[in-house]
Image (spheres, rainbow, N blue to C red):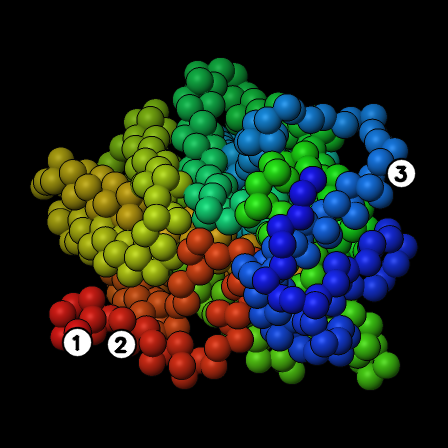
Amino acid sequence: MSHVESSHEGSSPPKAIDEKDSSHVDFASDSPKQHAEVDQIEADALRIADVEKWRINSFIDDLETQMQNDGQKRGIFHMTFANPKYFTWSVVAFASMGGLLFGLDQSLISGASLFYPDALGFGSDQVALVSASLPLGAVGGAILLIPSNEYMGRRWAIILSTVFYTIGAALQAGAINYGMMISGRLIMGLGVGIETGTVPVYVAETIERRLRGNVVSLYQFNIALGEILGYVVAAIFLEVEGNWRYILGSSVVFSTIMFLGMLFLPESPRFLVHKKKPLEAYRVWKRIRDVSSAEARAEYFVMRQVVEQENHSIESRKTTSRFVWLDFFTEPRARRAIVYANIMILLGQFVGINGIMYYMGTLMKQIGLNDANSTYMSMVGGGALFIGTIPAVLYMERFGRRFWAMAMIPGFFVGLAILGGSYLVDLEKAPKTVEGMYLAGLIIYMLFYGPYACLTWVIPSEVYPTYLRSYGMATSDGMVFLGSFIITYNFTRMQDAMTKTGLSLGFFGGIAVLGWFYQLFFMPETKDMTLEEINVVFSTPTRELVRRNWKNTLRTVGLRS
């Protein structure tokens, strides 16, 4: 492997990096910056990646030599492809199946709720808690996210989540009383909490930057696909005796497939570097990237230097604090990330999406449809959400994060307005008008919410620094399901207190308007950046970000050149 000549005369190639050696490649020609700030280390690493390419070549040569000396270690479930791109898509396919499981549950419980309350003798409050107990369990799963990700790794955390999914689905399908049903929902919720907080991170840490936004968006695409599939399953078992048991138990098939598939996938290379296993990380990198590419080499170089420096910074601070998560309060870069990501998530939850999805069948009955038609027409809402995610999956990186937020929120506000207006029409005098308005509003709402929903997985998966990513995703994951629990459990109460129109247009619509202005001023653009480059974005003071966003907005609308 030939080295590129250095443009810096007098510099010498860096020494070999041993698996057990914690020393770093020097970032500048004068001296190693062992105690420099992470953002400065990153700036130096990016400069080397751009200018001093011979250092990267030497760095990779050293790793190749170590791999040859160490031998090829293959586990029982080791799988690889001649073309790394095929392996990348295998990672995407199996990991994103977690989204399918999550979406499947939302629609399965909607279909089953038309039947199991009568079969088990549940009242309305019990039905509300059954629906809401999964997001409540998912909050517990978000708490387990930190230890499972930090001590087991991304891959095994996902595998653990599939076990919870399977146990929970089996308990629900075999439920003979209220306690058994709630237990099944809570256990499945643990799986949901771990899986939804881990899969987007696993994909983001594995996929190359030009595809990251699109591929993480695929997670939401699979959620929407799972929702459609759940309605289809409910329709298939509609006339079968004990149909709700088959409906709720059907997710076992998909959790088993995901469990088996994840056994053959590797650990996240960034996590392995974080855990001081650089040689193992490089082995994984070679399986998922074409390391003959200069870009892939440079990305690995920058990633390793930044992550190792983060680890070094953590070790140096352990004498004063043992709690790394305190950086969310003391470090401006980390604080900006957690505040932005979690406010964005709560705003997305409080526009009503999970309440509408969980109660879709019931809402259809409220506009005059019978059980069978409610089940069939629920596919319309799920189908619209599914179709809405497709543009984001294809063009998330092309148009950027801010476009999808700013353009979609007005659209689903219009949908909420039409949906809320349908309740003002007399159902007895004009049933077809009510049905038409409600379905039109629902379709518009779902079509425009689809791309925004993708952002709620893309943004949290990429904004946190590697050493805090598990902690940050735990809070973001917890916010998703705390918001979902609040809306789902109180949905019927909110309808009664605010009226159906007041809830749809006043509350959900009002939150959408508030969210639009929040994104306008505080949303950074992170398209086509590596996770390490995003560190620089969040190192920018908030006032500077607001000023830049406002200037760009004025330029976009033609008020400023």
Image location (x, y in percent) of residue 252: 63, 27
Image location (x, y in percent) of residue 524: 41, 67
Which of these two is toward me, 182 or 526? 526
Image location (x, y in percent) of residue 293: 57, 41
Which of these two is toward me, 303 or 178? 303
Q: Tags 1 and 3 in contact by the CB under 8 Å rule?
A: no
Q: Which residue is mark 2?
A: 551
Q: Is residue 482 visible?
A: no
Residue found at x 18% / y 51%:
418
Residue found at x 67% / y 77%:
37
Is 222 on the left-hand or right-hand side of 158? Answer: left
* Sequence order check, earlier mark of 1 and 3: 3
Residue type marked 1: Arg
Tell me the CA gap for discs 2 and 1.
Answer: 8 Å
Q: Which residue is mark 3?
A: 69
In the picture, residue 370 is in which quadrant? top left
Which of these two is toward me, 287 or 154? 287
Q: Which residue is mark 1?
A: 560
Marks 2, 3: nearer the viewer: 3
Image quarter in which the N terminus is found? top right
In the picture, residue 491 is in which quadrant? bottom left
Tell me the CA gap for discs 1 and 3.
Answer: 61 Å
Q: Tags 2 and 1 in contact by the CB under 8 Å rule?
A: yes
Residue type marked 3: Asn
